[in-house]
Amino acid sequence: MLDSNPEIEARLAALSPEDRAGFFALSIMPAWFTQQAAVAVIGEEEADPESVFYRLHTQHLLNYDKPNNRYSWEPALLAYAREHAEPTTLEAARFRHADHFIDVGDQADVFYAKGGGCVRLGLTLFDFERPHLEAAFDWLSTREDRESAKLLYYLVNAVVYTGGLRFNLRQKLQWAEGQLRAARILEDREKEEYAWGNLGLAWSALDSPRKAIECHERSMAIARELKNRLSEANNLGNLGLAYSALGEIQRAIGFYEQQLAIIHQVGNRKSEANALGNLGCAYRKLNDWRKARELFEQQLAISRELGNRRGEASALSALSWIYGNLGQQRLRLEFEEQARRIFHELSCRRDEAGSIGNLGLAYLNLGQITQAIEHFETALAINRADGDLQGESVGLSCLGLAALDSKNFAQAKAYHEQALAISREIEDRQGASNDLNNLAMAHLELGDPEKSTELCTEAIAIAREIGTREEEANALGNLGRAYLKMGRTGEAQALFEKQLARGRELALPPVEASALWNLALALKKKGQNSQAMDHANQALKLFTEMEDSMADEIRATLAEWNLAPSP
C-alpha cells in the first residue's frame, strides 16, 4: 500500500495534469540536473516541456542552485514521486534520460578530443554529469530489448575518452562487457568488432594479456571479414601490446610493423603516432636505445603536430626513460616532469603514477633517497587505488631499490618478494626477471649468496628467453657478486667481463660502470691492485658523469684502498 502525504498531495492537486506528469517523470533523476536535462526528460510527455519545467520550478517543487545553475529535489518530494509514479511513466522517462545523456557524453568527449584548453572543459562536463551517465548505464544494462541495447552501445561509445580517464579499471571492464552484450543483442557485426576491441583493452589494463589476446583476435577476425583496414590495424597494435606484456617482444614487433604498414596505406596520423610509440617501447625492451629514441621522437613530433597532449606526454615519458638508462638523470627529470604535468592536466591517473615513479627513480640515482621514496609511495597509492597490479608491482620494486640503497636489506627483501608475486600472477615475465634480480641483491646483502645465485640464474634464464639484454647483463653482474662472496673469484671475474661487454655493446653507461666497478672488486680480491685501480677509476668517471650517487661509494672505497684520486 502506498504511503500518503497530505501536504505533498495538496501541492500536486494544484498542478495541471501536464505538470503532474512532468513532476513524476523527473523523479528518475539520480542527482542534480540542468534545465536542459529536465526538459529532455519531460520531453514528449508534453507539447511544451519548457513551460512545464518553469511551472514546477516557480511553484517551489524543485530546488535551484544558482552558482552551478542546476536543480535538485527536496528528499521528501523525491521519495513521494518515485513511490507514486506509474512504471510506464518512469520507463519512458528513463529512455529519454539515457538518450539525452548520450548526447552529453558525446559533447564531453568532443571537447576532450579537441585538446588544449578544451580538455579541461570535457572532463569537467563529464564530472558534473557522471551520476547521470552511470545511472543510465546501470538501468540499460538490466534490459534485453533492442532499443535499450542500442542506447547502451552508444552510451559506452560516448565516453570512450573521458570515461577512459575517470573510470577505475574494473568499471572500464564492466562498461566494455555491457557494450559487447548490447552489440550481440543488436546482431550488428561492426558494433561487435568494436566492442571486442574495447573489452580487450579493458583486460590489458587489468594485466590479463591472455584474455586481451582472445578479445583482439575476435575483433580482428570481424574487422577482416568487414574489410575494415583501420580496425584491423588497431587490433594488430593491441595484440602487440598484449604479447609484449607476456614478454614475447619479437612477436609484438611483428604485429606493430604490420599495424604501421596498414596505417601508412590508410593515412591516419594519430594511429601512426600510437603505433610508433608502441614499436619504440618494444625496441626499448630489447635495449636498442638508438632505434627506440628515433621512434619516440617521431611519435612526439606527430603528437605535437596534431595537438594530441596525451600522445605528447607518452612520448616525453618514453624519452625520459631512454635518457635515464643512458645515465643522463638531469635530462630524465626534465622530460619526465613535462610528461607528469601534462598527465596531471589531463587527469590521466595511471599515466601520472608512472611518471611519478620514474621521477622517483631519477632521484634515487641522484642519491636523493627521501625524495625518491616519497615519489614511489605516491605512485604506489594511486596504482593500488586504481587496481593496477602491474603498477603496484613496479611501485613495490622501486621501494625495494630504495630500501637497498638505505641498507635496509630485510625490508628490501620483503618489497621484492611482494613485487615478484604480483609479476608472476599477471604473467609479466620481464617484471619477474627484474624482481628476481633485485631479490637476489637483497639475499646477497643479507648474507645468503647461495639463494642469490639461485635467483640470478632464474632471472638470466627468463631474460635470455624474452630477449631483454639489459636485464641479463644486470643479472650476470649480480651472479658474479654472489660468486665473489662465495670465494669463486675467477668465475665472478668472467661474469663481470661478460657484463662489461654487454654494457658496451648496448651503449648503456650504467651497466658499463657497474661492470667496471665489479671487476675492480674482483681484481682487488686477487691482489691485482694496479688493474683494480684502473677499473675503479673508469667506473668512478662514468658514475660521476651520470651524477650517480654510486660515485661517492667508490670514492670512499678507494680511500680505504689508499688509492683515492682528487675529488
Image: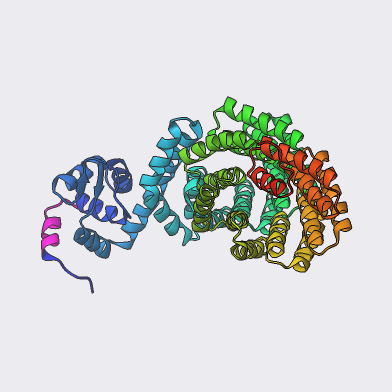
- Front residue (pair 147, 178): 178
Is residue 12 found inside the magenta-colored segment of the image?
Answer: yes
243, 446: nearer the viewer:
446
> In the current view of this chain or complex, which residue is farthest to the front?
562
| Residue 283 visible in rendering | no
Q: Position of residue 301 (x, y in %)?
A: 63, 27
Point out the image quarter for the N terminus. bottom left
From the viewer's perspective, tell me whether residue 448 is left or right of residue 343.
right
From the top left corner, tell me how far across and down residue 210 is, in percent: 70, 58
Residue 383 screen position, x and y as percent: 53, 54
Q: Residue 28, image x and y in percent?
A: 32, 56
As drawn, the residue found furthest toward the top would be 305
Give the residue drawn at x 81%, y 56%: 480
Which segment is the magenta one?
Answer: 7-17
On screen, 237 above or below 417? above
Whether residue 199 appears in magenta in the rendering, the answer is no
